[in-house]
């Protein structure tokens, strides 16, 4: 397991293999490098930090990405497009939407598939929408693990299941569900809202209990199938 190393006013960067002066942002960055290795399975050999991600000439300013991740060590060595770009902020900095788009510029230049903005108070994950001009961001609730980077089906499933709804999208979906339940079951508006509340309560309860598992339609069908199989076993037992 990769751990933070500090000594007096220095912190060790395993990606650059040297000791750096501890700053609030540097501490956040090195902690997140550990998280990427320990929780997501990425290796140091497929990552880099403080990487220049534009072609600005001297005197014109150079943009650097805090952390860059490739699909493999080989893709990094071949200087292929990045897979994930991470922008870190210190904990005393409130992350504003404009910070997302600063990092978005880095991720767009690196042709990354995903972008993260992070401090220890808040982490946001985005899918890069390459078919939009300019390249846009689609907020999701997690990124793929290292063993999923080449599994297109898994990546698609991850994005679809963990897409973060905007308030407007959520309101429209809630209104649509309310009307379907009201019309199908011939319920009053209050009764339909009560049924939706039950569904949301079940979803919240399940996800709190199961941790990172999302109560999606796929998961619902899996649980339903298991329940029906259990019912059938109980019936045959008697």
Image (spheres, grey):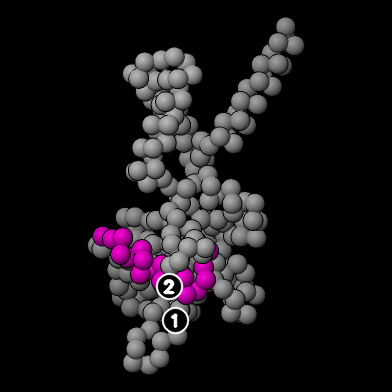
Sequence-wise, which precedes: disc 2 or disc 1?
1
Percent from the top left, x then y, of residue 126?
A: 45, 58
Between residue 91 and residue 71, name the one nearer to us.
Answer: 71
Q: In percent of the image, x 38 and y 73: which residue is there?
A: 11
- Residue segment shown in magenta: 94-115
Q: What is the crowding at mark 2: few (fewer than 14 residues within 10 Å), some, or many (at least 20)?
A: many
Q: Position of residue 36 (x, y in %)?
A: 50, 61
Whether the magenta-drawn stretch holds residue 108 is answered as yes
Residue 164 position (above or below residue 21): above
Residue shown at the point (41%, 15%) measured from the top left: 187
Q: CA distance from mark 2 to mark 1?
A: 8 Å
Q: Secondary structure under badge 2?
A: helix
Q: Quadrant of residue 225?
A: top right
The answer to whether mark 2 and mark 1 are in CB contact below 8 A is: yes
Image location (x, y in percent) of residue 221? 61, 30
Q: Quadrant of residue 23?
A: bottom left
Would you name the residue on which mark 1 appears?
54
Residue, disc 2: 106
């Amino acid at each position: 397991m990769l751990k933070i190393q500090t000594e007096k006013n220095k912190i060790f960067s395993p990606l650059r293999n040297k000791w750096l002066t501890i700053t609030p942002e540097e501490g956040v960055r090195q902690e997140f490098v550990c998280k990427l290795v320990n929780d997501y399975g990425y290796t140091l050999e497929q990552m880099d930090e403080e990487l220049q991600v534009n072609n600005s000439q001297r005197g014109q300013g150079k943009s650097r990405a805090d952390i860059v991740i490739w699909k493999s060590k080989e893709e990094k060595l071949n200087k292929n497009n990045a897979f994930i770009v991470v922008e870190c902020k210190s904990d005393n900095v409130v992350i504003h939407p404009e910070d997302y788009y600063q990092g978005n510029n880095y991720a767009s230049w690196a042709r990354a598939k995903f972008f993260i903005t992070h401090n220890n108070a808040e982490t946001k994950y985005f899918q890069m929408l390459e078919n939009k001009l300019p390249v846009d961001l689609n907020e999701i609730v997690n990124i793929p693990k290292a063993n999923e980077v080449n599994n297109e089906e898994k990546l698609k499933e991850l994005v679809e299941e963990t897409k973060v709804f905007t308030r407007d999208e959520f309101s429209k979906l809630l209104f649509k569900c309310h009307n379907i339940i009201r019309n199908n079951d011939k319920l009053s508006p209050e009764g339909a809202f009560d049924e939706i509340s039950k569904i949301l309560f079940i979803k919240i309860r399940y996800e709190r209990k199961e941790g990172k598992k999302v109560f999606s339609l796929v998961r619902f069908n899996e649980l339903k199938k298991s329940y029906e199989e259990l019912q059938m076993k109980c019936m045959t037992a008697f």
